[in-house]
Image (tube, rainbow, N blue to C red):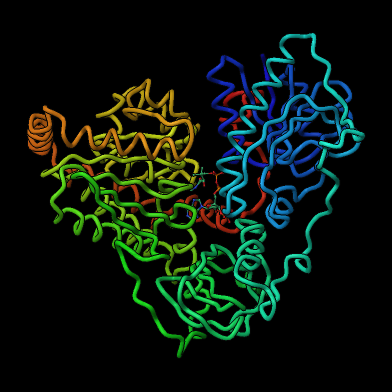
Amino acid sequence: MRVLFLCHAFNSLTQRLFIELGARGHEVSVEFDIHDAVSEEAVALWQPDLIIAPFLKRAIPENIWRNHVCLVVHPGIPGDRGPAALDWAILNDETEWGVTVLQAAAAMDAGDIWAEARFPMRAAKKSSLYRNEVTEAAVQAVLDALDKFASGNFTPQPLDTSDPAVRGCLRPALRQHDRQIHWAKDDTATVLRKIRAADGFPGVLDEVCGVPAYLYDAQPEGELRGLPGAVIAKRGGAICRATTDGAVWIGHLKIKSEGEPAFKLPATQALAGRLDGVPEITANIGGGECSAIRYQEKNQVGYLSFDFYNGAMGTPHCEALRHAIEQALTRDTRVLVLTGGEDFWSNGLHLNLIEAAESPADESWRNINAMNDLTRAILTIDDRLSVAALRGNAGAGGVFMALAADQVWARPGVVLNPHYKAMGNLYGSEYWTYLLPRRVGAEHALTITENRLPLGVAQARQIGLIDASFGADPAAFLNELESRAEALASAPDYAARLAAKQQRHARDEAEKPLAAYRAAELEHMTLNFYGFDPSYHVARYNFVHKVPHSRTPRHLARHRGKG
Ligand code: COA
């Protein structure tokens, strides 16, 4: 089928559907919802059999839905309506939620139902539920709807409001007033629910140290106590605030400013100069409740996880992780498994920290060198085998960092974006010019980096970008990961594998040293950061400040042809 995606942005859910439909042989083109006339033009050019709106913030123009079947993906159960479906589900402490695929009609989210899928709710931030449970349910429901549409004999059903099992209802948009935290009376569970219901967007507006700020990235604290609302500790980039019955860590803030638009930063950085006297708790790398980097060991396998907010890795994150790897390598294990974060493996350079720096060019330079040092530390592990285990999505330099491990394993739903060009023609480093062709060959390497398209795990496996994918859900992935890693550690050919890797490193190094790849990549990056063409700086500014798209990139809008 020819399918047109009408969407607000090519976000993770849209990318995943793009991959799934493509894998089933459908031809998918994408148009961003910028203006009704542009959407109408896209429909006229592509002549789609079906239009899908995976992530839309405005109504589809009537001219389009009256003349074409348009399926809208709504992150709510049947009957649920409104623009804040997941936010309400978290605030209301729903135990089960779902995704409904409806046909676009005059009233938003009220069209006839083509398919639905449910999932048990999890105590997590909205963006995490969206990237995991909602995305999986959306894939299931959209594929179901596509089959029904293709059969030609399915009639979508209007919502049966007389059915007592229909629990969904119209819920209004949430105002900051509805999200407000009442520190004097809200307990920890309530505070967490309120922050998570607004994380990643829009955040809960509050006052911290006398400054209005949006709160994100909340975790419960086990021991610390204090006056409700007070900032009682800091640790890494996070601040700890007391509640009526405990305390919560808040990792990121966006200051609400009247002047220069602000963006999310680690809380201590956003509050620089305002935390004097707040006691610092040593960030405990390798352990501790709130530490982003954790190390565990079992049956001769070391597991190192690094759950950085949004997968963004600034200079300090890269240095801390490299240090943690060095520490892990002092342990008596045979395999080191790097498990990234729950939602993201890594998205490469920390563009927000770079944007906030006095000299973004200098900070870009420091950050890419720290990423390179980290990648080299993984690549040169010579005394044991290494595995990159991707539980969540990876983008740009984050993908290439994973390729530095001997084995790359991924959960089936993971979306990979192994390219840099979309960020203002960034050339990229992380030894990608060595790591990518050695896995997929020169031809695929060129296609992957030039096409700037997301890659699914099945396709990534087919071309050799990754080695294996398994586990129906995150828990199953972790279980099987453990048994596979242990099998690797005790494999009869362990010594032979290790020797083969050492020989390969020596051979490759003699042919062309890693330092030569790095130097050549960094030559291009110097031009990106300091050269005449400001494209990277403009693209980064737009990305960090979330400047709305003014057009759909040509590589996605296939109906406009490649220009
Ligand atoms: N630095 C800082 N923040 C980043 C980031 C990065 N490298 N990559 C993603 N984020 C943030 C986004 O700003 C967004 O923030 P929010 O919580 O305020 O919404 C969040 O992570 C999720 O990103 P989003 O773009 O909404 O996710 P997605 O799944 O739709 O898209 C990517 C994934 C990887 C395609 C996209 O995030 C991207 O292009 N990231 C930049 C990659 C890059 O160029 N890195 C630098 C070169 S190594």
The residue at 28%/33% (across/down) is 484
Query: Which residue corresponds to the image point at 75% horizontal and 66% vertical from the top-left?
Result: 176
Q: Is residue 233 left or right of residue 86?
A: left
Q: Is residue 540 visible?
A: yes
Q: Residue furthest front?
A: 164
Q: Nearer the viewer, residue 127 or 5?
A: 127
* Viewer-proximal residue among 373 and 126: 126
Residue 270 lies, with reference to residue 51, above or below; the image says: below
In the rendering, at what x and y percent does residue 210 appear? Answer: 63, 85
Q: Position of residue 352 (x, y in %)?
A: 49, 61
Name the residue at 16% across, 47% down. 333
- Please provide percent x and percent y for residue 195: 63, 63
In this rendering, position of residue 66 left or right of residue 300: right
Nearer to us in this view, 295 or 513 = 295
Q: Is residue 540 left or right of residue 366?
A: right
User: Above or below — where is 72 with respect to 233?
Assistant: above
Name, please, the residue furthest toward the bottom.
277
Q: Residue at x 60, y 70 (%)?
A: 188
The front one of 370 and 111 is 111
Is residue 519 visible in the rendered image? The answer is no
Tell me: residue 330, above or below residue 148.
Answer: below
Q: Residue 32's image quarter?
A: top right
Total marks shown come to: 0
Percent position of residue 19, x then y: 54, 27
448 relative to 48, above or below: below
Q: Can you say which quadrant of the picture contains the C terminus?
A: top right
Check the picture and name the quadrant holding the N terminus.
Answer: top right
